Amino acid sequence: MINRFENDHDFTRTGAGLRYPRANTAVGARPAAEDASGMSRAYRSIKTVPFNGLLTNRLLTELPGEDFARLLPHLEPVSLSCGEHLYRLGETVRDVYFPEGAVVSHLYILADGSTTEAAMIGREGLTGLSSIFASPVQTYWTQVVIPGTALRVKAEVLKEEFARGGAMQRLLLAYAGAHIEQLSQRAICNGRHTVEERLCSWLLMIHDRAGDNRLPLTHERIAHHLGVRRPGVTEIAIALRDRQIISYTRGHICITDRPGLETVACECYRTLSRQNLTAANP
């Protein structure tokens, strides 16, 4: 379940994520120090003070101060739990999420009930991209694979910002291109590379986005995302553990030798990493 962060008194980075000023919602209360446009001086000052530097989401940190100032009042910090479904198949996208610490997957469900991950989203991007391009109904499930923080905004707000042109439109178009390339590369990867190669690439992609060597992943969940049987994942995990590339306990996998993991991973990881860097600097 998505929960608002509590005690959001200061616009600072804390252990729980980004904190925003709490709005005064008392009856008859007047917003503090508003200018003629209705935006408080605190928010207006973000034009000159790069507060989005407190964030880790690349799309938001790349926004110029004035663009970020328009978006800031609409951003809501949320905590996403493991396995949570942000959008289900056929649902209309009403909210867009900018992951910070969380990692999200697009899962396709086949007729026999099996699943395969088509794309992964972390701090380099956002979810609900289709809603911005007038395709709001989901053709896949969007599920949280690594729990953590994110910033939520109404899809309509982001569509309006996109329609302005400028920095937000440029960033979202560059990200859309990178997202399409990821979908294409993952499709090739699923058809051509071994399960071991794919698993190693997938762990590296998760690690890049989560920023933590210790990942809350079970063999069952990995199999669910790779579209393979759990015993196969367990066999590969044992082999990687014996080579001291990873270690694992119940419910967690720890990457102990990242260069070793990169050696086993397929070429797709390096290709996708270059694409992410290009998208971050359009």
Image: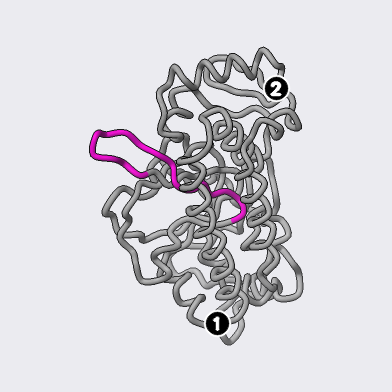
Q: Which of disc 2 and disc 1 is earlier in sequence?
A: 1
Q: Point out the frontmost of discs 1 and 2.
A: 2
x, y (%) of residue 201? 60, 37
Q: Please, what secondary structure does the residue beneath circle 1 have?
A: loop
Q: Residues within 10 Å of mark 2 (few under 14, many from 20)?
A: many
x, y (%) of residue 9? 62, 53
**Is residue 274 positioned above or below 28 on the image?**
above
Question: Was residue 111 drawn as part of the magenta stretch in this picture?
Answer: yes
48 to the left or right of 275: right
Label ID, residue 245: 2
Q: Callout 1, which amino acid?
A: Gly
**If the image is split into quadrants, where does the C terminus sit?**
bottom right
x, y (%) of residue 133? 41, 71
Q: Please, what secondary structure does the residue beneath circle 2 have?
A: loop
Query: Which residue is situated farthest in the bottom direction here?
Result: 36
Q: Callout 2, which amino acid?
A: Ile
**Is residue 231 positioned above or below 147 on the image?**
above
x, y (%) of residue 195? 51, 29
Residue at image coords 66%, 30%: 264
Residue placed most toward the observer, 100 or 247: 247
**If the image is split into quadrants, where does the N terminus sit?**
top left
> Are the residues tagged 1 and 2 within 8 Å (C-beta)?
no
Label ID, residue 7: none
Question: Was residue 21 drawn as part of the magenta stretch in this picture?
Answer: no
Residue at image coords 53%, 61%: 75
Residue at image coords 43%, 47%: 106
Residue stretch rendered in magenta on the structure: 108-124
Label ID, residue 165: 1
Q: CA distance from mark 1 to mark 2?
A: 46 Å
Dividing the picture into quarters, in which one does residue 254 lie? top right
